Amino acid sequence: MNELDETDIQLLKSLGENSNLTTKELAAKVNLSSSPVFERVKRLEGNGYIQKYIALIDAEKLNYGLIVFCNIKLKQHDKTVGRQFVNDILQLKEVVECYNISGDYDFLLKVYAKDMKHYQDFVFNKLGSVRSIGSTHSTFVMCENKNTHNINL
């Protein structure tokens, strides 16, 4: 972060809160004209500080109100099995996040489902077809209190 100055940090904060801001709106927030702000944002994108722009979508409004964190333990541990597991998981539309973790489990998945029946079908028919899985443990979200991907700078 040494190559970032206070203006870069403020731009990242502003875009993290609302990625839909125009260059003109960003310029007003950091007290610069539009041209240098445009160049700074392009530099931040080019250097990988900004990976992509997303919209946070209300899953409940789309009838995907069941959120499940699914812990996965693999049958065996080697890089071929791990890579194949990740490739298999990337194909499952219900899985929105996948983390390789330490501890009792190997992976943590965040899954959106329409309801318990949909999740059951997902576990039996989709996860069940991933041969490298040794065991799973599901935790069901009762209430989502915070949902943001923004980093507090």
Image (spheres, rainbow, N blue to C red):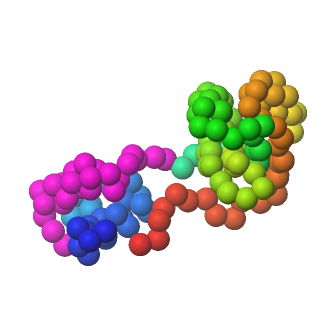
Q: Height in image: 127 above or below 64?
A: above
Which of these two is toward me, 113 or 89? 89
Residue that appears at 81% across and 28% down: 128
- Horizontal and vertical percent for residue 97? 61, 45
- Horizontal and vertical percent for residue 95? 66, 38
Residue that appears at 41% across and 72% down: 153
Q: Is residue 152 magenta?
A: no
Residue that appears at 78% across and 37% down: 75
Position of the N terminus by quadrant: bottom left
Residue that appears at 76% across and 27% down: 131
- Horizontal and vertical percent for residue 137? 84, 47
Give the farthest residue toward the bottom.
6
Q: Is residue 17 visible?
A: yes
Q: Is residue 86 visible?
A: no
Left or right of 72 in this view: 97: left
Q: Which quarter of the figure has residue 119?
A: top right
Q: Height in image: 116 above or below 41?
A: above
Which of these two is toward me, 39 or 135? 135
Q: Is residue 52 magenta?
A: yes
Left or right of 19 in this view: 32: left
Left or right of 38 in this view: 142: right
- Horizontal and vertical percent for residue 17? 43, 62
Q: Which quarter of the figure has residue 135?
A: top right
Q: Height in image: 93 above or below 20?
A: above
Magenta span of residues:
31-55
Tally the marks. 0
Q: Which quarter of the figure has residue 9?
A: bottom left
Which of these two is toward me, 84 or 39? 84
